[in-house]
Amino acid sequence: MSVVKSYAAVDLGASSGRVMVGRLGSDTLELTEAHRFANRPVRVPEGLRWDVLSLYAGVLDGLRAAGQVDSVGIDSWAVDYGLLDRDGALLGNPVHYRDARTEGVAEKVWASVPAAELYAATGLQYAPFNTLYQLTAARGSQQLASAERLLLIPDLLTYWLTGEAGTELTNASTTQLIDPRTRDWAHDLARKLDIDLGLFAPLRQPGDPAGVLRADVLEETGLTGPVPVTTVGSHDTASAVAAVPAVDERFAYICTGTWSLAGLELDAPVLSEESRAANFTNELGLDGTVRYLRNIMGLWLLQECVRAWGDPELGALLRAAAEAPGLRSVVDAGDSAFLAPGRMPERIAEACRVSGQPVPRSPGEITRCILDSLALAHRRAVLDAQRLARHAVDVVHIVGGGTRNALLCQLTADACGLPVVAGPAEAAALGNVLVQGRAHGLVGDRTDMRRLLARTQPLTRYEPSGDPATWRAAEARLT
């Protein structure tokens, strides 16, 4: 009789957090939701901040609802951090990556280290909110001057749960301060930019022990100790890629949610100038792998429109989008012009107007424009990644929240000209659970993990249809 254990996966997204309980055995992988809670950033006079105390309270509530588990793992979004003083106290709420403080900072960094040199050292794409730029923006602030420790968001919550500090590698690789070849800090780069790497806690690998729940946490949650906390791929995309149910190496993935992260799993980084110009990033994954991908604005575009429209019923909106003419108007879903919140329908309409395309007016037309644009961005990323990495693929795996959007999945298959396998929806949580279980001997390598996912999780296959030339023509409108 196979052993089955229970693991709590704390999975924090940009708009909500959840604590999931995974039951894992040699032929068992079941996931249930223990608790879900909102993640609402707060705008205060000094800027946009994460309400990290509310998030931590949600984690504690979720662990209480989860009941007795064999381990806990935490993953979240990337780049953001909390600063602690010498007593371990938090120095203010963490700054949100959409805060305006990094505007114009990249140019200051490039004056010391040109963009090409920065990419050659770290392999990370340009994004205005990378941790490197955030730290440069914070230079000279009283808060940074008072800090003794910097912890990325999942590491901060782990520290509060256990009292032990570490920096998980997959998430550290998004700071633009890691060398993807050595999988260690880029010390020379940090010296050139006067960034104190001593602020960071020691690096941890997925699967490493991260301590046990503190006595006060046990009392708060009603759990019986000791309950270990296990380091997982704490960047949610690293956990999600670990949960791609691929049968071999010839696959591309698209991790969908607020962002779309589209790319390949490779054995080594791609650090060419052509790769930099195409804005691909080399983030680290499990077992020495590289997540070679492009960040695309993702379902953020639709989320912001839905919010502006007063939260209409999503099913009706998608049905209206399916009935609207396809590829009538498209926008560049990777354009930083769509990064900030607010007035998204008007901004999409204006982008269409400026590019000389028909202006979508109804919610259904705007939704179709968004989904066509995302599918087109997925196509460009998958094609570009194969060319730049010289790594051909036969199938595209879509994981995450976008798997529930059948129209987006079909449009992506049509755009890429490749079959799309959609699922699992809760990929980050499942990857989180699987890494915990692997650390405890319940599952083997990534191949074993993926075979278990394919056997146990519902998957939907979409075959490409339509004329590929229509997608090439739409793409030409954006060049």
Image: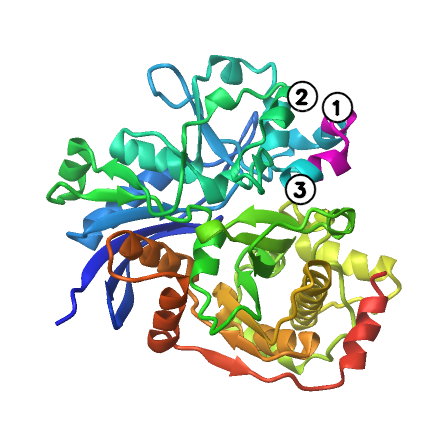
Going from N to C along the chain, the mark reached first, 3 or 1, is: 1
> Residue at the location (70% across, 72% down)?
365
Q: Give the amino acid at mark 2.
A: Lys
Going by the image, does 27 lie left or right of 268? left
In front of the other: 101 or 397: 397
Q: Which quadrant would the N terminus be assigned to in this image?
A: bottom left
> Residue at the location (32% across, 32% down)?
159
Q: From the top left corner, tell me how far across and down residue 307 is, in percent.
A: 56, 56
Local SS, label 1:
helix
> Mark on residue 127?
3
Please name which of the two marks, 2 or 3, marks the residue nearer to the observer.
2
Q: Can residue 313 be seen in this view?
A: no
Q: In this view, does 326 lie above or below 478?
A: below
Local SS, label 3:
loop
Q: Label 1 vs label 2: CA separation?
A: 7 Å
Local SS, label 2:
helix
Mark 2, other Cα within 10 Å: few <14 / some 14–19 / many ≥20? few
Q: Which residue in the structure is indicated by mark 1?
A: 112
Q: Give the amino acid at mark 1.
A: Ser
Mark 3, other Cα within 10 Å: few <14 / some 14–19 / many ≥20? some
Q: Are marks 3 and 1 in contact (CB under 8 Å)?
A: no
